[in-house]
Image (tube, rainbow, N blue to C red):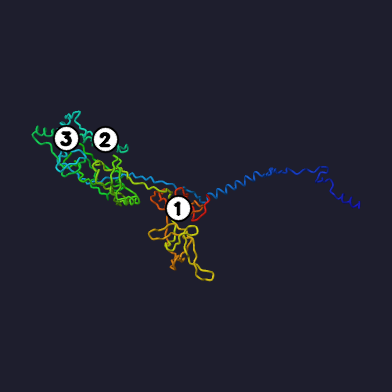
Amino acid sequence: MAKKTENRTADKPAGRPSSKPANRTAAPAANKTEKVKKYRKPLNLNIGMVIFAGIFVYVVVCVVIYFQTSHIVRYQVQEGSLATNNIYHGVAIREENVVYTTSTGYVNYYAREGERVAKNDLVYVVDETGRLNEELEGLNMGENSLSERELAEFRNEIVNFVHGFDTYNFEKTYDFKYSLKNTVLKLANVSMLQSISDLNSTTGTNIINYSNAPSSGIVAYWVDGLEELTPQDVTADLLEEKDYEKKQFISNSLVAAGDPAYKLTTSENWSLVIPVEAERGAELLEEDYVKVRFLKNQYESWGKVNLLTNADGNTYLQLTFNNSMVSFISDRFLDVELIVEDETGLKIPVSSIVQKEFFLIPEEFVIPGGNNGGESVMRQCYLEDGTISSEVLEIDVYNFDEENREYYVDSSILDVGDTLYKQDGQETYSVSKRATLIGVYNMNKGYADFKQISILYKNDEYAIVRPNTKYGLSVYDYIVLNADSVSDDQFINQ
């Protein structure tokens, strides 16, 4: 065996270096990349964090439920009235005839505006030369030439202007100026006529032309093109006064033949047309006459009511008067207040009002005074063996129609086709007739209990209902503010 080993050794090529060094230690793995892992801190749960998370989830769920459910808000019924806006802007309509000049020259008015003149009374004169104005300027009226009555006319003019003054409508100040000037000229009429007579005698010719009234009436020294306006012609654009223009006539102004000089109002009957809502107008129409306060001078009068629907589709109220026309002869547009009695009763929100359907049961088929003091009916029923019998059923009554002698009965108690008996006879009635009532949901008993109401008046927000009705509301009752948020007989957590 040793011999064989030696021979194997001898077979190796001589002098060939070994592929591995004889005495070299093993080299470590060359440049191995080491992975650095981040240390994860362990989650330390404690009881405080668990409780906080639970509360947070609960709050989120409550918020979601709150916004997904309807909320029932109660309202306490109080006595009250509705303050309605009864101020209106209207246009005055009168029987007006415009009178035109027949000669050219300087006009001087003799009659005062608002004065009644008879037929053929002198209204104005036309001076062809202008010399009359020079004579009038030279007149000395004296300090004590005005009587108490004449001073009262001035005071009346000033008071009317003060009450009707509006800074946003300053042009009316000029109307006041011209009216006051005409009043002064009226007070100088005697001197003016004397000057005219002296002037004609000096010149030897009649250079002053007299103009007399063609008919009796009230004199006004202005025109606006609306002298032939009728109540049916009134529109919303007209009342806005956007294109309205009033021409005032003043003394000593130059006129040509054919120019308008003044106008006569021939009747004391006149109208004021104001815009109203159709429902409001129908209510006022039932009154026939309405008391009106004119804001210009606080004068009050009664106007006969007529309702109009004009070409623009709007509703207008025509108030006709047979007095006070002279007080507003210089005005085309007036602001007035309608003095109507405010309805007083139980004040409830409009959002509380709901309609509900009921069965109508004749009075003779309702038995008064049940076990709980209410009403009941005798209804046909069938026994287990199929025989016909009757049963007494308590009902909830919500109203009684005095005219037709019928009760309004809750439709959830009876069914269509139920047969009712009279208490003292065999006559029957088949349940079928229905009607609706307007009411609110009362929540005094902890559930939505329908109560019938009788509305006296309402606007967009509140309604006034009749108090102290048998099946209605009482003051301090609690009702559902929004009727859409509950259903009939729904339990309510207060």
Q: Nearer the viewer, residue 406 or 189?
A: 406
Residue located farthest toward the left when viewing the structure as drawn: 204
Q: Amino acid at mark 3?
A: Asn
434 sits to left or right of 221: right
Residue 130 visible? The answer is no
Residue where numbered disc 2 is placed: 158
Q: Amino acid at mark 1?
A: Val
Q: CA distance from mark 1 to mark 2?
A: 55 Å
Q: Give above or below for 468 relative to 425.
A: above
Mark 1 or mark 3: whose residue is earlier in sequence? 3
Q: Residue at x 44, y 57 (%)?
A: 398
Q: Quadrant of residue 202?
A: top left
Determine the secondary structure under disc 2.
helix
Residue where numbered disc 3 is placed: 189
Residue 369 is situated, as x and y percent measured from the top left of the image, at: 47, 59
Q: CA distance from mark 1 to mark 3?
A: 72 Å
Determine the secondary structure under disc 1.
strand
Q: Are marks 1 and 2 in contact (CB under 8 Å)?
A: no
Q: Quadrant of residue 365?
A: bottom left
Q: Give above or below for 482 relative to 208.
A: below
Residue where numbered disc 1 is placed: 440
Q: Amino acid at mark 2?
A: Ile
Looking at the rendered image, the disc whose residue lies closer to the viewer, 1 or 3, is 1
Determine the secondary structure under disc 3.
helix
Residue 11 is situated, as x and y percent measured from the top left of the image, at: 86, 50
Q: Quadrant of residue 213?
A: top left
Mark 1 or mark 2: whose residue is earlier in sequence? 2
Q: CA distance from mark 2 to mark 3?
A: 21 Å
Q: How many marks?
A: 3
